[in-house]
Image: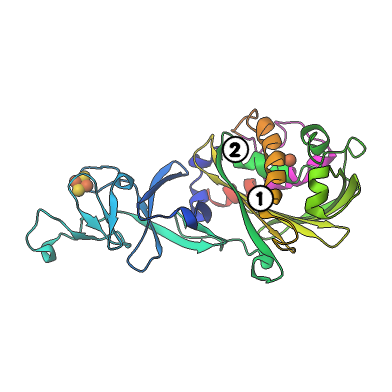
């Protein structure tokens, strides 16, 4: 599956930039092979457009923002948040600006500390993460970086409970638990949902983060995958601590994904410093990245093409669900 060849992926929301990175300057990004520019409009709301001026195709993200309008770096035409050209410095009377002086804009909204963008008519809303509204949870932004692999590989990896023993050898993988103690997954309207239990190693660094002295522990997991590239992994520890990982692999193009990960925890900064939480998840994530970047980015949805084992059930369900989605759009 090549994401840029399937128009339907334009109809989903993706987080493309942390809100904190939206400065006074326009920001460029590539989403599904489409170059876009993001800026804050006159109301301070995120605006998104094609990163290409309608005059001579100059890249607008190399320009600037004045009074919430995007200013082209080539001849200074200005565009408002709806893409309408509101000033042509070479024209004496700007009320004469032709209506065709316009750039394509896209939908944008802020959620969970990120600007989410949809390039088409949305099929679904932004995934609802209930704990993000729960005051007993704090949200910690974790990673925002490009990985050279398909987003689907990362989604499958999140729910693949056979890989920790081999991949997470310096973090939580346990040789005593090469397979999960239990796993159940089923299809939903939005993707898949399920539960699992996995015995894991609990190294010293993580013992402090979890407030648990034991060298081994058990993760009771609630799994949710939202079409096409967002997953939520709620890790429930036996002492009541909950650590939720939300990860979207925003598709840049066929071979690269922007990893956007944050976590939610029902503890406080006084209990455990956010930087220590991020440090452990950083080590885990780098272990995944090293192996995932070696995989083929053209992931076959036809399950006859790659080989499978029983722990691949979530991945098989994801491929079937995506196959149906693509078929429904033909
Ligand atoms: S190319 Fe943008 S104003 Fe000329
Ligand atoms: Fe992993």
Q: Is residue 304 magenta?
A: yes
**Label 2: few (<14), some (14–19) or many (≥20) C-alpha neighbours in 10 Å:** many
**Residue that appears at 71% across and 63% down:** 268
- Per the image, the residue denoted by label 1 is 275
Mark 1 or mark 2: whose residue is earlier in sequence: 2
Distance, label 1 to label 2, CA atoms, is 28 Å
Say above or below: 32 vs 223: above
Where are the magenta residues, as a range? 299-320
Residue at image x 63%, y 45%? 323
Q: Check the image and name the residue furthest to the front.
A: 270
Label 1, residues with CA under 10 Å away: few <14, some 14-19, many ≥20: few
> Residue at the spot x=78%, y=39% of the render?
171
Q: Position of residue 286 (x, y in %)?
A: 67, 36
Question: Does the stretch in magenta take in 211?
Answer: no
Q: Secondary structure at mark 1?
A: helix
* Picture coordinates of residue 247, whole percent (x, y): 64, 50
Find residue 54 and report its horizontal and vertical position in percent: 24, 49
Task: Name the one closer to the observer, 229 or 267.
Answer: 267
The structure's colour scheme is rainbow
Does the image show residue 55?
A: no
Q: Which residue is mark 2?
A: 150
Can residue 269 be spotted in the picture?
A: yes
The relative height of residue 11 versus residue 61 in the rendered view (above or below) is below
> Depth check: 105 or 66 in front?
66
């Amino acid at each position: 599956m090549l994401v840029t060849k399937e128009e339907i992926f334009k109809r989903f929301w993706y987080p493309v930039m942390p809100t904190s990175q939206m400065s006074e300057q326009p920001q460029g990004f590539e989403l599904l092979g489409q170059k876009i520019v993001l800026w804050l409009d006159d109301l301070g709301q995120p605006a998104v457009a094609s990163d290409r001026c309608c005059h001579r195709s100059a890249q607008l993200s190399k320009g600037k923002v004045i009074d919430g309008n995007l200013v082209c770096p080539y001849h200074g035409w200005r565009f408002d948040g709806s893409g309408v050209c509101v000033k042509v410095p070479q024209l004496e009377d700007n009320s004469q600006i032709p209506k065709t002086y316009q750039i394509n804009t896209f939908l944008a909204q802020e959620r969970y500390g990120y600007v989410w963008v949809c390039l088409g008519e949305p099929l679904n809303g932004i995934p609802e993460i209930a704990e993000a509204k729960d005051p007993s949870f704090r949200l910690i932004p974790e990673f925002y970086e490009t990985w050279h692999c398909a987003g689907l590989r990362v989604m499958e990896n999140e729910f693949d409970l056979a890989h920790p023993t081999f991949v997470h050898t310096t973090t939580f993988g346990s040789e005593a638990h090469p397979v999960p103690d239990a796993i159940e997954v089923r299809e939903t309207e939005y993707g898949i949902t399920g539960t699992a239990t996995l015995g894991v190693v609990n190294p010293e660094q993580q013992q402090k983060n979890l407030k648990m002295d034991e060298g081994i522990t058990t993760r009771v997991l609630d799994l949710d995958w939202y079409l096409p590239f967002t997953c939520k992994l709620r890790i429930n520890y036996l002492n009541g601590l909950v650590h939720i990982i939300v990860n979207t692999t925003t598709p840049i193009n066929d071979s690269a994904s922007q990893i956007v990960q944050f976590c939610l925890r029902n503890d406080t900064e006084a209990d455990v410093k956010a930087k220590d939480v991020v440090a452990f998840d950083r080590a885990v994530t780098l272990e995944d990245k090293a192996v995932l970047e070696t995989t083929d980015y053209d992931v076959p949805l036809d399950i006859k093409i790659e080989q499978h084992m029983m722990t691949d059930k979530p991945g098989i369900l994801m491929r079937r669900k995506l196959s149906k989605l693509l078929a429904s759009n033909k």
